[in-house]
Image: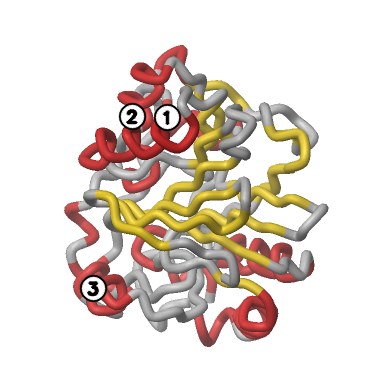
């Protein structure tokens, strides 16, 4: 990124991607602030783990001086919603997710457990201990509007990108072809602890240990590649842009079975 400004704040790595988009790496998952600090109004995309709530709140208030208008969830896995209830209560911000994700966010349905048999490293190996039970957000959670509009972000639209979870969404701004992809694809090999620590950029499918539908995941990556985004922020890994993004995402979409789908695993046989 040409305009990046990198700094460390406690458990957070904070990077200005554009004048109105801030990328926040919070331990194992990424968060986005969307909104121009000079105007004040903004939206939080995902919340990271509960353990980073205090640092995230401090950074957000320091940057914007006020609470977000809303919290938008790309999906409901533990590393993206761990702080959602606390932040919603503290910041008095409503939370929005895709209708198909609501059962996992209202205590009605658990996610499938992590699959250590996909291989790839320590992160995959310990995935059975990752939380996969539903959380109950009560009246904090709301369904995203039909048609793709995003509350309080009129220039953006949400795109249904299932596979990693039934109601997974990505966010896209057509005016400058900016993509917030969630875990539809990521830019690090999340199964490997060494890759997670180094943050070396590698275009990957969604985290394999938590992806139950590889056919949908494949179609979602193709859908995003067809947009030809100029800039992307993913749920894990570093932001990417320009030619690196175009080539990496196109290659992943064209060779998804070879590059993303594990050779074996609890949820792989259905895809094969």
Q: Cβ–Cβ below 8 Å for labels 3 and 2? A: no
Check disc 2 and report its element: helix, strand or loop: loop
Would you call the spot at circle 2 few (<14 residues within 10 Å), some (14-19), or many (20 or more)? Answer: many
Name the residue: 45% across, 68% down.
238
Residue identifier under label 2? 135
Distance CA(mark 1)–CA(mark 3): 28 Å
Residue with the mark numbered 3: 193
Q: CA distance from mark 3 to mark 2?
A: 26 Å
**Can the viewer see residue 119 in this picture?**
no
Residue 116 found in image quarter:
bottom left
Name the secondary structure under disc 1.
helix
Q: Residue at x 47, y 65 (%)?
A: 206
Marks 1 and 3: which is nearer the front?
3
Number of the label disc, if any, that sits on residue 105: 1
Which residue: 47% across, 61% down?
5
Q: Which mark is residue 264?
A: none
Among numbered discs 1 and 2, the one appearing first in the sequence: 1
Q: Residues within 10 Å of mark 3 (few under 14, many from 20)?
A: some
Q: Residue at x 62, y 46 (%)?
A: 20
The front one of 4 and 50 is 4
Instruction: Mark 1: give few (<14), some (14-19) or many (20+) Cα within 10 Å.
Output: many
Whole-percent x, y for residue 189 in the image: 38, 76
> Could you tell me residue 147's position as x and y percent?
80, 35
Q: Residue furthest top?
A: 139
Q: Check disc 3 and report its element: helix, strand or loop.
A: helix
**Contact, mark 1 vs mark 2 (Cβ under 8 Å):** yes
């Amino acid at each position: 990124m040409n305009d990046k400004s990198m700094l460390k704040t406690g458990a957070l790595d904070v990077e200005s991607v554009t004048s109105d988009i801030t990328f926040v790496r919070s331990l194992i998952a990424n968060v986005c602030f969307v909104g121009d600090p000079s105007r004040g109004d903004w939206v939080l995309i995902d919340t990271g783990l509960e353990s980073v709530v205090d640092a995230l709140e401090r950074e957000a208030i320091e940057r914007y001086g006020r609470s977000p208008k809303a919290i938008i969830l790309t999906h409901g896995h533990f590393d993206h919603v761990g702080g959602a209830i606390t932040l919603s209560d503290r910041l008095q911000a409503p939370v929005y997710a895709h209708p198909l994700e609501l059962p996992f966010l209202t205590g009605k349905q658990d996610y499938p457990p992590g699959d250590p048999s996909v291989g790839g490293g320590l992160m995959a190996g310990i995935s059975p201990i990752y939380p996969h039970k539903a959380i109950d957000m009560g009246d904090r959670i709301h369904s995203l509007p039909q048609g793709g509009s995003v509350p309080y972000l009129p220039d953006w639209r949400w795109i249904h990108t299932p596979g990693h979870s039934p109601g997974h969404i990505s966010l896209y701004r057509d005016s400058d072809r900016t993509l917030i992809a969630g875990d539809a694809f990521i830019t690090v090999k999340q199964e490997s602890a060494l890759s997670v620590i180094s943050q070396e950029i590698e275009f990957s499918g969604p985290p394999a240990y938590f992806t139950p539908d590889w056919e949908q995941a494949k179609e979602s990556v193709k859908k995003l590649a067809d947009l030809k985004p100029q800039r992307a922020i993913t749920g894990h890994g570093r932001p990417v842009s320009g030619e690196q993004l175009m080539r990496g995402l196109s290659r992943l979409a064209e060779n998804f079975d070879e590059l993303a789908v594990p050779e074996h695993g609890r949820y792989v046989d259905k895809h094969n």
